[in-house]
Amino acid sequence: MAGGLAVAVLAPFGAAFIFAMPSSAGSGSEAALARHLRESGAVMYGAYWCPHCQEQKALFGDAARDVPYVECDPTG
């Protein structure tokens, strides 16, 4: 329970970190963040139809495949 709460609280900070990165950071930064999130046990919960979830995945680019993801919509 505490782990899920930590992810819910820390996820916006991760998004803010991505938005704050200079555009020249390249895909290495996204990959490093995705790897760190995976290694720390973070999980992204989302729905395929949610525009906010799609936006978060898009911010990671190709590294999105390295972020543990749980689809919450039973039809997704």
Image: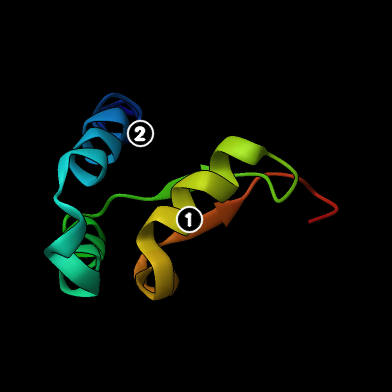
Q: Is residue 42 above or below residue 33?
A: above
Local secondary structure at mark 1 = helix
Q: Earlier in the sequence, mark 1 or mark 2?
A: 2
- Residue 49 placement, left or right of 27: right
- Would residue 56 appear left or right of 37 to someone viewing this image? right
Of 39 and 66, which appears nearest the observer?
A: 66
Mark 2: which secondary structure?
Answer: helix
Q: Position of residue 71 (x, y in %)?
A: 64, 53
Depth order, front residue of 3/21:
21
Residue type at tag 1: Lys
Q: Specify the label residue 57 is tagged with.
A: 1
Taking the spot 39% from the left edge, 54% from the top edge, the residue there is: 59
Disc 1, disc 2: CB below 8 Å? no
- Residue at mark 2: 4
**Residue drawn at (80%, 49%), measured in percent from left and top?**
74
Residue type for callout 2: Gly
